[in-house]
Image: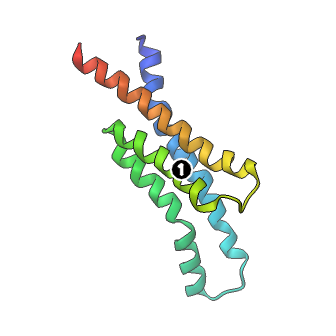
Amino acid sequence: MKQTSRLFVYWAPRILGILFALFISIFALDVFDMNAGFWKTTLGLSIHLIPTALILVILALAWKREWIGTIGFIALGILYIYLSWGRFPLSVYFAISGPLFLLGILFMVNWIYHDERKRT
């Protein structure tokens, strides 16, 4: 594999994981539309940022162990569909679970490539 391909396979899931965490974090900002007090707003923001925290924890664990990213991101995508099925239009499932599945696949490609490099 060429150097540019190797760099892409390594960095693509990591950069996309950070960007996806930022994308999901945007949805937490709707807490500030409520006319609640400081503590209720803080609690609401904390609750809304739980998915972002899960994504960042899986990303941190997957940084050196790609198999964790493979399993973790695909599991998060399946969990999201399972927990929210029927509540949103189909496009929402593609917008949230689609990137999670893509991240899982990209980490799997990186894991397989990394494993092949170890054997040679």
Q: Is residue 114 left or right of residue 23?
A: left
Res 34 → quadrant? bottom right
**Is 28 above or below relative to 56?**
below
Residue at 58% in and 52% down:
22
Question: What residue is disc 1 on?
Answer: 78
Q: Nearer the viewer, residue 85 or 20?
A: 85
Judge whether residue 83 can be spotted in this image: yes
Please say which color scheme the image uses: rainbow
Q: Amino acid at mark 1?
A: Ile
| Secondary element at tag 1 | helix
Residue reaching furthest bottom? 37
Position of residue 10 measured from the top left corner of the image (x, y, whole percent): 42, 28
Res 120 → quadrant? top left
Q: Quadrant of the N terminus?
A: top left
Residue at 41% in and 14% down:
3
**Is 70 above or below relative to 81?**
above
Residue at 76% in and 54% down:
89
Q: Is residue 66 left or right of residue 33?
A: left
Position of residue 62 measured from the top left corner of the image (x, y, whole percent): 36, 42
Judge whether residue 10 can be spotted in this image: no
Q: Mark 1 Cα within 10 Å, few/some/many (few <14, many 20+)?
A: some
Position of residue 52 measured from the top left corner of the image (x, y, whole percent): 51, 58
Residue at 59% in and 59% down:
25
**Is 100 above or below relative to 33?**
above
Position of residue 111 measured from the top left corner of the image (x, y, whole percent): 36, 29
